Image (cartoon, coloured by chain):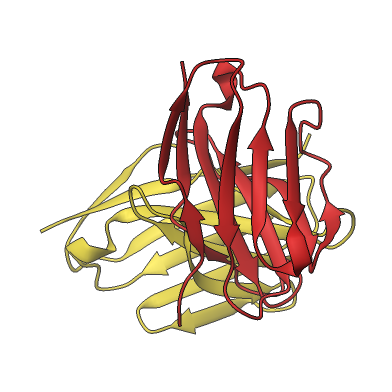
Chain colours: A red, B yellow
Amino acid sequence: EAGVAQSPRYKIIEKRQSVAFWCNPISGHATLYWYQQILGQGPKLLIQFQNNGVVDDSQLPKDRFSAERLKGVDSTLKIQPAKLEDSAVYLCASSLGLAGRNEQFFGPGTRLTVL
Amino acid sequence: SQKIEQNSEALNIQEGKTATLTCNYTNYSPAYLQWYRQDPGRGPVFLLLIRENEKEKRKERLKVTFDTTLKQSLFHITASQPADSATYLCALLARTGANNLFFGTGTRLTVIP
C-alpha cells in the first residue's frame, strides 16, 4: 500500500515570496490534515479536511496561508507571503475517519527554510 | 491554559532495559490518547491508541497506560533495542471542542548498545 506522498521534500525561499506544497493521501482516506512542525516541537494542526470540506482551520493563519483539497483527494497548502517564522517542516497526514479515533498516516514532510 | 508535557530532556537507557516515557496533560479531557514514533527527517508513525475508559494497552514490547485521575499516560518499551532510538510523541483528542489531535513536544529516546 502506497503511503502519503508529499512534494517537494525541501524548499528554500526568501521572505515575502510565496510557496506551495502538495500532498497525495492514501487512497480511500477521507480525512486529510496539514501540520506545521517547528524544530523541537510537536506537530501543530493547521487545517483538517473531511473529503473536500474543511472540518477545522482554526489554527491556520488565514492572512497568509491557504489550503484546498480538490475532488476530495490531493491537497495543496500555500503560503503567501512567507515570513521567517514559517520555517518549519510541513507534514501532511491522512486517516480513514475522524482524528483521534483513527490512526493517522503521515507523509515525509516538506522542510521549508525562509531566509 | 492547555498543556501537554513530555519528558523535557532526552532519555538515554541501556539496551535490554525498559524505557518509560511520560505524557502529562493540563486542562484537557481526552477521549483518546495516541503515541507516535518519529525518526529524523521522517513523519510520525502511529504506535498505539488508548481510550479514556481503558487503563492499559499492549502491543508486542510496547505498553501504554492511561490515568485520567493523574492526567497522565506512560509509554513503556520493554527489552529496549538500539533500533528503538527515536523521538516519541503523545497526542490526545479532547472529548469536547475541536475534533483534532493535540501533540506533545516529544521525548528523544536513545538506547545505548
Q: Measured along the vertical axis of the image, is residue B34 above or below residue B87?
A: below
How many numbered marks, from 0 up?
0
For this orientation, the residue located farthest to the right is B97
Residue at x-position 20% and y-position 67%: B81
Is there any visible trace of residue B7 in the rendered image? no
Of residues B10 and A78, the one nearer the viewer is A78
Image position, residue A48 (x, y; %): 75, 56
Image position, residue A99 (x, y; %): 72, 66
Of residues A99 and B111, the one nearer the viewer is A99
Of residues A18 and B106, the one nearer the viewer is A18
Q: Quadrant of residue B32?
A: bottom right
For this orientation, the residue located farthest to the left is B113
Residue at x-position 68% and y-position 26%: A80
**Is residue A94 toward the left or the right of residue B17 in the image?**
right
Residue at x-position 44% and y-position 34%: A11
Q: Where, quadrant-wise, is the N terminus of chain B in this rendering?
A: top right
Q: Measured along the vertical axis of the image, is residue B11 above or below residue B60?
A: above
Residue at x-position 78% and y-position 51%: B28
Q: Where, quadrant-wise, is the C terminus of chain B in this rendering?
A: bottom left
Is there any visible trace of residue A56 in the rendered image? yes
Image position, residue B71 (x, y; %): 69, 55
Image position, residue A106 (x, y; %): 52, 61
